[in-house]
Every structure is written in C-alpha cells, then in structure tokens.
Amino acid sequence: MQDFVQHLINGISLGSIYALIALGYTMVYGILKMINFAHSDVYMVGAFAAYYVARWMGIDAQPGIGTLILLLCVSMVFCSILGLLIERLAYRPLRNSPKLNILITAIGVSLLLEYGGQVVFGADPKVFPEVMKDFVIFSAGGIELKSFDVTVLIVSILAMLGLQFLIYKTKIGKAMRAVSSNPGVASLMGVNPDRVIAFTFVVGSALAGVGSVLVGMKYPKIDPLMGMMIGLKAFVAAVLGGIGSVGGAVIGALIMGLSEEMVVAYLSSTYRDALAFGILIVILIFKPAGILGKYSVEKV
Amino acid sequence: MKRLLLSLVLVLPLLAGCTKKDNVITIGEYDSMSGSDATFGLSSNKGVRLAFDEINAAGGIKGKKVDLKMMDDQGKNEEAASAVTRLITSNKVVAIIGGVASGRSKASAPIAQSHKVPFVSPASTNPDVTKVGDYVFRVCFIDPFQGLVMAKFASENLKVKKAAVLRDVKNDYSVGLADVFVQEFKKRGGEIVTDLSYQAGDIDFKAQLTQIRSKNPDAIYVPGYYTEVGLIAQQARQLGIKAPLLGGDGWDSDKLSEIGKEAINGNYYSNHYTTESTDPAVTEFIKKFKAKYNETPDALAALGYDAAKILAAAIERAPDLSGQAIRDELAKTKDFAGVTGKITLNENRDAVKSAVVIQVDGKNRKFITTITP
C-alpha cells in the first residue's frame, strides 16, 4: 500500500511535467490545426538558455526562489522569441499551403534544432543549475511528498487555468477562438489572424520555457536531444486528452505519467515507451477525438 | 547507369593513388566525440593523441611520423561501422584504435576483421568484442571480471548480504556486468532481492527505486553510464534509500559528480586505474597529461594512451606494415608496463590485469582496494 501511494505520487509528478509540454501542442493545434513538432525542441533551447544565463551570471550555485523566478523569466523570453521566429520564418510562408507541407516543415525545424543544438551546445550532457532546494512537505509511514513534485503539479494546473481564462474570458482569447473556427471570416470581422497566431506561439513557447526550468530543476541533466522523448510523450498525452482541448491535455498527461509509472512498477521498464505509443494507437482506433475532444471532419 | 560505372572505374584508381604517402604511418581512430557518452570518446582521444605526440617527438615509428585520422561516431552503432569503413577504404589506415563502447565495437570490429586491419579497443569490456576474430584486441579487462570484482568487494569488504540490481537493458555492457555480478554474488552466499531495469535516456527512475526501497537491500548494483547513474543516485537519496550504490567503469567521468551532486558521494565503482597510484608510470603519465590538457586524466584517457602505446610498439617490432605482421606482433604483447597496469594479451586477445575499487568523494576518487583476477 505504501509503495502504491508512492508510485501514485511519482506518476502524478511525471504526468504534470508532460502536461506543461502537452499544453503547448494543444494550443497551437487548437488555433492552427497543425502539430508543431518543434515545440519540444523550443523547450530544449529554453533549458540551455537558462543554463547559460545562470552560468554567465554566476548563480548556478545559489538555489533560491529568486533564482527560480529569474530562470523562469529568462527561459520564457528565449522560448517566446524562438517560437515567434519559427512561426514567422517557417510556418507563416506556408500558411496557405496544404497541411502536410506544414507538418513536414515542423518535423524539419525540429530536427534542425536538435542537431543544430548538438553543434552549438555540444552533444555531451550539461548539468542544469541548482534552482531550488528540494524539501519534504509531508511525510507519513515512509511516504514522502517533495516540494519539487508539488511545485510542478501546481504550476501545470495554474498554467491550465490561466490558459482557460485567456481563451474564454479575454478579448485576445475571443480572437483566438474566432481564428480557430474560421480565419477568413475572422479577418473580415477585424481580427488580424497573423497577430493572433503569433500570440499563440508566444504563449505556447513560454509554457515550454516554464516546463524546461521545472524539468531541469527535477532532473538536472540537459542535452540537445532531451526534447525528443518527452515531446513525443506529451504529444501522445495531448492526443489522448483530445488535442485542442486545454483540460484534456492535462488529463491526458496525468494518465500518461501514472500509467507509465505503474507499468514500470508492476510490469517491466522495457514496456515503458511501448505503452505510450500503444495508448496512442488504441485511442486513435476507438476514440479518435480523445477524451475531451470534439469529433469533427478534418480536411487534410 | 553505364556512365556511372564508367566514371567510377576512372575515378577509383585516382583516389587510391593520391592517399598513398610514404613518410607517414596512418593510424585510424574512431570514437564518440559527440553524443550522450561523449566524455568517454573525448578522454580516450586525448590519451591517444598524447601517446602519438610523444612518439612523433621521439622520431616516430620506424622513422616515420604517425598521422592520426580521427572519426566521430556520434555515439551510434551505424556511424561507428561507417567510420571504420571510411578509415580503411579511403584513408588506408594500417591499424585502428577502436571505440570505447562495446556495442559500437561489436558493430564495427567485423569490418576491420574482414579487411584484415588490426583493431585495438581501449575500453570495450564486453566479452563478445574480441570474439569477432583474430584481428580484434583490447587493452582493458572484460565485463565478467568487473562483475566479479564488485561481487567480491560487496560480500568481502562491505559485508553485503542482500543486494538489488538496476541495469540498463539497452546496453550490452550493463547487462554483461549485471549478469556476472548476480551469478558471483549468489555463489558467495548473497541474496539478490530484486533485479530491475531502465533504459539509457530515461530521466525518471522513481518507479524502480520505490520498488527497490520496499525490498530494503544493503547495496544496489547499478552498472550503467554516468549520465543516468547521477540521476539514479539523486532520486534514490530523495526516496530515502541509504544503501550504497555500486558500479563499474561506466561511472568514470567528472560529469558523474556534477549530475549526482552530493548524492553520489560515498558510492563505489570498479575501475582500470587510480590517480592516487604511486607507480612511476602513472605519475609520469598524469604529469604529462596535466601539462598538455590542464586536467586530470580519467581511466578512459589512460586506456587510450595504453592502447596507442601498445599498438605503436607492435608496429615498431613488425617486419613490415601489413595487417598480418602488425597483428602477429600485437598478439605477442607481454608484460607491457602501461599506465593501467602490467598488460599481457591472452589467447583471446583480452588484457589480463587487476582492477581497483574507487569511492566517489566529490571530484575526488578515493582508492579503496586492488582486486586481482
């Protein structure tokens, strides 16, 4: 029983990390109906930006709340700029091309960042600065709840609530929904789709930046290929929850994290990655729209 | 198609003609200069370069300068195979100093074997590597020995009764060490309470560690590479596991303590040599290495250095530069006073020598004991 509760905590903590990244996939998909495969590599660049700034400022050995906030800001700013650039240079010129072209471009941008990252940052793993001290919040009968696990969960739920608020309660959110349902008509109504889409990329990439600092804090090893697996898992989580749905991304991510943890705990770690993609296949067969997604006919 | 063939026929002799140089001996080296275990390749290459620079400064081999051709395999098996092919076919190397990782040596050594080019691996410890053929050698001990060393150390020195194993299933090296450890540890009356696995590239090991915690072992054998081991150590301590971690030479990197921070301190691993040795061969090597690179050599650097020196000695003794002649001389290597100990290559082309057990203490590596075969 004690072990089971510990596995539960570990799984939710892993799932909340997937959630932060899944939110980025789901947002861009919700507005543009495209899968931004470069999202997980924006996250990687965010981690490296935080790493280099921390070293340059000499704060890589001063854990504290100030360091956390500073690195979050740095990473969010870098990721937003990179997201904007990618949108501007790679996706916008293809806005009116077939969906497949944009999808393949996204994969191209992703590979460019991954292998370009190996050239620029070097391929050997770097050690992320110590952002905060991890301490026990709650402990009973050998079960421990650590501050990192709680922080990550709270941040991803806050991010989800913030996004819901942004999309349903603000003017720009209204514009986003308008562009999402029909960009042509939206522009006739005085919405500038280019600006709305650019804004979507800024918000999505900033979330990736938050994710990268929190992951770096929990698993202090970063390398240029770090986005690959986590990005795929987060993508599966977004599809599982219903891609395009903000709440769905978080639910899907928590399910992913928990089932991975339970598979490793009660079956074998060899099945860990197989499970993620098994889930994807099963979902696509039986409920293609995902848990919270709405089914609609898609023209590709 | 016809035109392509014709142009190939015309171009090939030209290519072959222009790579031939008479006053140099071209030796090839491939290793992971990038990729997730790049520090292994970078270190090993530093050792090799130091050795050949010394040899060249002293007049070279047979009066000819050594020209080292370096290829990067990016930590991938298929790249290693293509690097070796390129070294042999386009650079016309007389011998190859092979990779550090066993999986990659297994992928590339058969190519050297089929071209009859001697292949010397500095640190591929998997037993199957030299079984590829009679042109494949290594200057390090093999996995069964490292597994045995740790099983012996755990039961005799640490008095461990119950041990857990956490192995990297994707990695031949890790699986090899773990298998032998389990076998030897049981033979010595110990009990393996659980045997779990992870995969290189994972970052979360809490599920396995939570299971290990419930079995309450006296020690955990984690024969993986430093990148994951650092994270495993941290997460183990976060879960409140106090049992020491034990490992093999895959731990040997400065990054281990950078990633593992204080969690990795106090844990033990088996290795090829220790910087605390007072052997003049070792102190001399460390001094020269520090002078050239301004850092302390790790075991991979020492092995790279030994591999280069043993290969150079064999080429010097060989009557000519044919693969056959060099191979025959390599096979005769006996009691070579290397940095990593007295090296004799046995009939399986494996080095026979002792291992040391080292305790991690921040950036320092405390020498604990020497264990002989």
Image (tube, coloured by chain):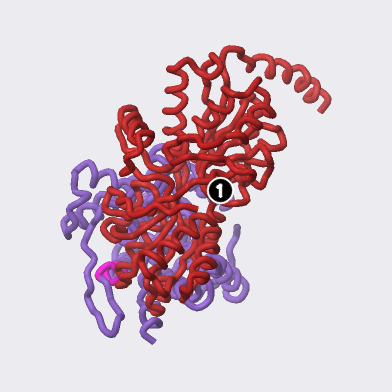
**Residue tagged 1:** B102
Write the residue at 69% across / 42% down.
B133
Q: Position of residue B110 (x, y in %)?
A: 68, 41
Chain letter tied to purple: A
- The reply, left or right, for residue B19 in relation to residue A50 is right
Colour that chain B carries in the picture: red
Q: Does the image show residue B142?
A: yes
Write the residue at 54% across / 60% down.
B175
Q: Is residue B158 magenta?
A: no
Which residue ends up furthest to the bottom in the rendered image?
A1
Q: Which residues are magenta?
A: A147-153
Q: Position of residue A225 (x, y in %)?
A: 45, 50
Q: Report the number of numbered marks.
A: 1
Name the one closer to the observer, A142 or B283: B283
SS class, disc 1: helix
Q: Overall secondary structure of the magenta stretch? A: helix
Q: Quadrant of the N terminus of chain A?
A: bottom left
Q: Chain of mark 1?
A: B
- The reply, left or right, for residue B49 in relation to residue B114 is left
Q: Is residue A151 magenta?
A: yes
Q: Is B290 rendered above or below residue A61?
A: above
Write the residue at 50% across / 31% down.
B308
Q: Is B327 rendered above or below residue A298?
A: above
Kind of residue at disc 1: Ser
Q: Position of residue B311 (x, y in %)?
A: 55, 30
Residue B264, by quadrant, is bottom left
Q: Does the image show residue A77?
A: no
Q: Is B63 rendered above or below residue A45?
A: above
Q: Quadrant of the C terminus of chain A?
A: bottom right
